Image (cartoon, rainbow, N blue to C red):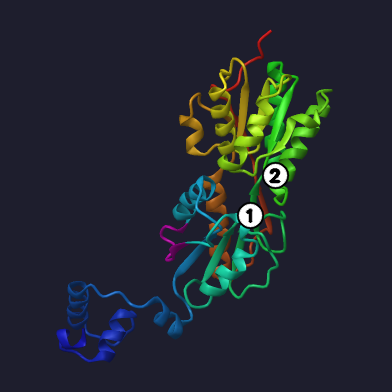
Amino acid sequence: MARAAGVSVATVSKVINDRYGVARQTAERVREVIEELGYESSIVARSLRSHRTGLIGVLVAEFEPFSTELLKGVSAAARDSGYQLLAYSGGGTAESQVGWERRSLSRLSGTLIDGALLVTPTIVDGNYRIPVVAVDPHTGPSDLPTVDSDNLAGTRAAVGHLVDLGHRRIGFLGGRPDLESARLREEGYRRTMADAGLRVDPDLVRAGGFRMETSELPARELLGRVDRPTAIFAANDLMAIQVMRVAQSIGLRVPQDLSVVGFDNIPEAAVALPALTTIAQPLHEIGQTATQLLLAMLRGEEPPTRHVQLATRLVVRESTAPPLP
């Protein structure tokens, strides 16, 4: 670039790094050459000089609807912040990758990213070299700044909706036992049933693992019973959609023969057939809030709070109705 612009290497370096000491016309010429040659400075080389990369890492175990929706909120909050985003997957499924966030951070922190958002991390110990915010960690709030939603209240609204419709035999398809969010959703189910004076039948409680492929068999077990439930609350939308598919495959009509409620309100919920009644997590707002906390930390500020919990809301669509008489 220096040869093409007819200037010294030091002059090119000053222009690239926006330093003083270069005449306006010379700087414009150098920028024209940069544009012509398509030059981009090395992030790693830049970080070695300035100890900053201008990148925020969004680290996930895998890319799935929950993390994808969060990313939209992160992107909106990072816009005009001076930082760019690096979305990085730890590889594999979350179940088989305990400790993925440590391995990912060891690869990226210090040379590629200035700070990180950890989405559903398995381990939150706070011993990281860069500013970190945890989103919906497995073990719940920790010493790290944490953002999540009100899983307990959301579940109580979901199961309460089914109770208000007249359902008494309500099944539960839970998530993963190692996740605090899954534990809270089961607690909400049991507490709401108890408040309504309804017994929880252990045969109507199954673990679905939060994934479509792992929830098919437990859904078939629930719906294949002679005394099957008239309604099922599934702890996320992916499992709820799978429940509806299984129901339809064995000749059950949703919602006439079976009501189904999910949790998350991912885009697939609105376009499912029938459209899924669900609990909306404010996924974009969670991403935005986590990013704002991280940006404050990158500015050297203390986050105003260590734990932000956002409200959920019931979204009633076409997959729920009163039970048949």
**From what the image shows, is residue 160 above or below residue 137?**
above
* Residue 131 lies in the magenta-colored region: no
> Label 1 belongs to which residue?
95
Secondary element type, mark 2 = helix
Q: Is residue 300 above or below residue 285?
A: below
Left or right? Give the position of 180 relative to 130.
Answer: right
Disc 1, SS: helix
Read off the residue under disc 2.
Answer: 182
Q: Which residues are the magenta region?
A: 78-87
Q: Nearer the viewer, residue 317 or 7?
A: 317
**Toward which corner of the image does residue 152 lie, by quadrant?**
top right
Could you tell me residue 141's position as x and y percent? 71, 56
- Comparing 296 with 126, the one in front is 126
Q: Are marks 2 and 1 in contact (CB under 8 Å)?
A: no
Picture residue at 16% right of the left edge, 84% below the top: 5
Query: Is-magenta flag for residue 82?
Result: yes
